[in-house]
Image (spheres, rainbow, N blue to C red):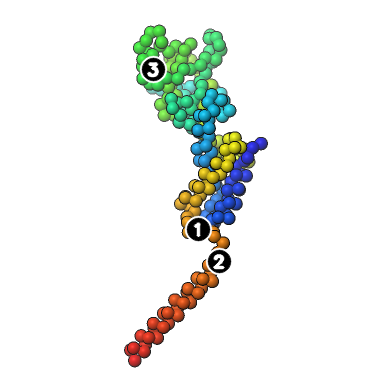
């Protein structure tokens, strides 16, 4: 088992306690910062590892819906990384007993490419050669207009959404161990420059209470001197 969210959050809070006045910092805030840092580190790492499936999430039985034009589509069940050409979606398959192989893959196109394919008799999407294109969180499926497809199998590179998908501090952080140091540094930077921890809260280990008392007494003495001088002048 790798490093957990709880372990990293406690490590960050211990560091902050040594460096800052952390009275306003809570565990949920630190976990949220960790989530942002993990996503920032994972995105380029996954892109660099392409076509590795180390971070690929496969979701079975994603329901197929139909819009008012009876065009089939699915709704992304999770947030994905916004790579070029919708590469956050690695694959989509649907089962078709009449085809060989049994699981039929979709080809990725953009809306302009779809229009070109539909105008070509030999390239028009069919149940044997379906296509998909993205519109916000909807993935439209072309070539299935004349058949019934209840679900598809979806392979995506999804982002870390701790509060919706994990909800357990003892869950291992899904990144290689070599990236954890960079994640911790990013979290500490967020704490340092964020609105909660300001420069005035830096804990430099100096006890300023005696200095404040001396300053206060000195100011009171000056006020007494001025009051005494004014009283003498009035006499």
Q: Quadrant of the N terminus?
A: top right
Q: Is residue 155 visible?
A: no
The residue depicted at 53 percent of the width and 24 percent of the height is 51
The residue depicted at 57 percent of the width and 25 percent of the height is 53
Graded by Cα atoms within 10 Å as few (under 14), some (14 to 19) or many (20 or more), the crowding at tag 1 reads some
Lower position in the chain sequence, tag 2 or tag 1: 1
Calculate the distance from the C-alpha at mark 2 to the C-alpha at mark 3: 70 Å
Q: Which residue is mark 3?
A: 114
Lower position in the chain sequence, tag 1 or tag 3: 3
Lower position in the chain sequence, tag 2 or tag 3: 3
Q: Nearer the viewer, residue 147 or 80?
A: 80
Which element carries disc 3, helix, strand or loop?
helix
Looking at the rendered image, the disc whose residue lies closer to the viewer, 2 or 3, is 2
As drawn, the label of residue 177 is none
The residue depicted at 37 percent of the width and 86 percent of the height is 229
Q: Is residue 182 visible?
A: yes
Percent from the top left, x then y, of residue 31? 55, 44
Q: Are marks 2 and 1 in contact (CB under 8 Å)?
A: no
As drawn, the label of residue 207 is 2
Q: Which residue is mark 1?
A: 201
Q: Is residue 168 above or below residue 146?
A: below
Q: Nearer the viewer, residue 31 or 189?
A: 189
Q: Are marks 2 and 3 in contact (CB under 8 Å)?
A: no
Residue that extends furthest to the left in the rendered view of this protein: 234
Q: Is residue 22 above or below residue 2?
A: below
Calculate the distance from the C-alpha at mark 1 to the C-alpha at mark 3: 57 Å
Calculate the distance from the C-alpha at mark 2 to the C-alpha at mark 1: 14 Å
Percent from the top left, x then y, of residue 38? 53, 38
Percent from the top left, x then y, of residue 65? 46, 22
The residue depicted at 53 percent of the width and 48 percent of the height is 188
Percent from the top left, x then y, of residue 148? 48, 15
């Amino acid at each position: 088992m790798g490093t957990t969210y709880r372990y990293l959050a406690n490590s960050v809070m211990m560091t902050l306690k040594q460096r800052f006045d952390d009275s306003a910092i809570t565990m949920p805030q630190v976990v949220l910062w960790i989530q942002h840092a993990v996503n920032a580190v994972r995105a380029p790492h996954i892109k660099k590892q392409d076509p590795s499936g180390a971070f690929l999430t496969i979701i079975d039985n994603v329901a197929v819906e139909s819009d008012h034009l009876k065009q089939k589509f699915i709704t992304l069940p999770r947030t994905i990384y916004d790579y070029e050409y919708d590469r956050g979606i690695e694959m989509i398959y649907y089962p078709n007993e009449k085809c060989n192989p049994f699981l039929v893959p979709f080809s990725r196109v953009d809306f302009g490419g779809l229009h070109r394919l539909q105008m070509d008799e030999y390239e028009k999407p069919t149940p044997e050669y379906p296509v998909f294109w993205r519109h916000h969180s909807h993935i439209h499926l072309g070539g299935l207009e004349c058949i019934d497809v209840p679900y598809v199998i979806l392979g995506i590179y999804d982002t870390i959404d701790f509060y919706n998908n994990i909800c357990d501090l003892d869950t291992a952080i899904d990144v290689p161990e070599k990236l954890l140091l960079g994640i911790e540094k990013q979290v500490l930077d967020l704490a340092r420059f964020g609105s909660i921890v300001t420069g005035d809260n830096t804990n430099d280990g100096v006890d300023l209470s005696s200095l404040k008392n001396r300053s206060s007494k000195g100011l009171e003495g000056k006020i007494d001197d001025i009051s005494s001088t004014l009283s003498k002048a009035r006499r």
